[in-house]
Amino acid sequence: MILIHTAMLIPRRVTTSDSINIIGITLTFIISILTMAFTIAMWRLTIATLRLHREQHQQRRGELIRQSANQAMRAK
């Protein structure tokens, strides 16, 4: 970054190579932000899925406990 700022102090014409470099840096920056956003979204989806799975597992476990309690009551 220091080199870029230092180079900007030297007056010269902007060449095609400079424009291509600026476009490349900008695209790289945009792609990195999109990748970060996608990664965060996937983590949130994973966490939500795990929570849902845990809730379903707890409900199923509760149902099994109730069923076994009912069977024990009927057996008496």
Image (cartoon, helix red, strand yellow):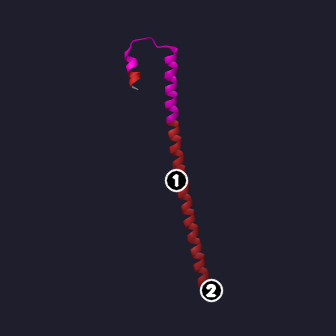
Q: CA distance from mark 2 to mark 1?
A: 42 Å
Residue 10 vertical placement versus 64 (above, below): above
Residue 23 numbered mark, or none: none
Q: Position of residue 11 (x, y in %)?
A: 39, 12
Q: Residue at x 54, y 62 (%)?
A: 55
Q: Position of residue 13 (x, y in %)?
A: 45, 11
Q: Nearer the viewer, residue 23 or 55?
A: 23
SS for callout 1: helix
Q: Which is the main secondary structure of the residues drawn in magenta?
A: helix
Residue matched to label 2: 75
Residue 47 numbered mark, or none: 1
Residue 52, located in which quarter of the rendered image?
Answer: bottom right
Q: Earlier in the sequence, mark 2 or mark 1?
A: 1
41 vs 10, left or right, is right
37 vs 73, left or right, is left
Q: Residue at x 53, y 41 (%)?
A: 38
